[in-house]
Image (cartoon, rainbow, N blue to C red):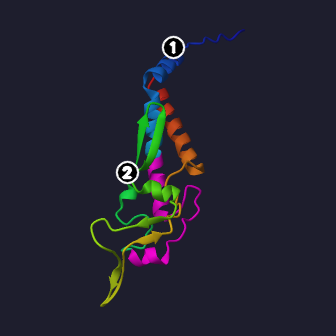
Amino acid sequence: MYIKITFDDDDLKRLVKNLKDSGNEKKVLSSIGEALIPINIDRHRREVNPNEKPWAKLSKLTLATKRKRFMLRESGEMLSIHYQVFGDVLKIGSSDWKAAWHHFGTKKYQIKPKNKKALAFGRKIGSGKKEFVRKYVNHPGLTAREIVGFEKLDREAAENAIIDFYKSVVNNI
């Protein structure tokens, strides 16, 4: 008595061909980008950095001038997180040009009026007015509040996106 085992490598050859021919780099990176967007938006809404540590609190002066109490969401533009794929590189970030200032922080700087003689800032509270007028302001600089990153949750999402992508390729042989 004997057992005869035959190896048919046609499926394996088709799988390797599909992996080579399907433009995988861009598709895999796009899958990863899609997986990372909601994670980064959620962290932004919860006001935490990629390591899940809370962002630094806003200064009293900043709070006095804000319409909303949320950090980095005054206009909502910084929540516009998107990704781009360039060859074998995935870039993810905000489309708001000020995002880099907040992500990395800034040094001290001076704010001067562009079209007026003085700066006016603050807000009106009830019948009283809480507004400040100055020729210039010495800004203490922005505290870094990381907006995007690639930490544990991001790595897990990327791994799952890669696994799901290759499962779909394998299932389509």
Residue 9, image x and y in percent? Answer: 55, 14
| Residue 40 located within the stretch drawn in magenta | yes
The residue wearing badge 2 is 95
The residue wearing badge 1 is 10
Q: 122 or 115, which is in the foreground?
A: 115
Q: Residue at x 47, y 45 (%)?
A: 35
Q: Residue at x 48, y 23 (%)?
A: 19
Q: 44 or 8, which is in the foreground?
A: 44
Q: Nearer the viewer, mark 2 or mark 1?
A: 2
Label 2 SS: loop
Tag shown at residue 102:
none
Residue 90, image x and y in percent? Answer: 47, 39
Relative horizontal placement of residue 117, taking residue 163 as reference (left or right): left
| Amino acid type, callout 2 | Ser
| Label 1 packing within 10 angstroms: few (<14), some (14-19), many (20+) | few
Q: How many marks?
A: 2
Residue 17, image x and y in percent? Answer: 48, 18
Q: Residue at x 48, y 35 (%)?
A: 89
Label 1 SS: helix
Dividing the picture into quadrants, the one containing residue 1 is top right
* Magenta residue span: 36-65
The correct choice, above or below, for 164 with respect to 103 in the image is above
Alpha carbon distance from label 2 to label 1: 46 Å
The correct choice, above or below, for 127 with respect to 164 in the image is below
Dividing the picture into quadrants, the one containing residue 120 is bottom left
| Amino acid type, callout 1 | Asp
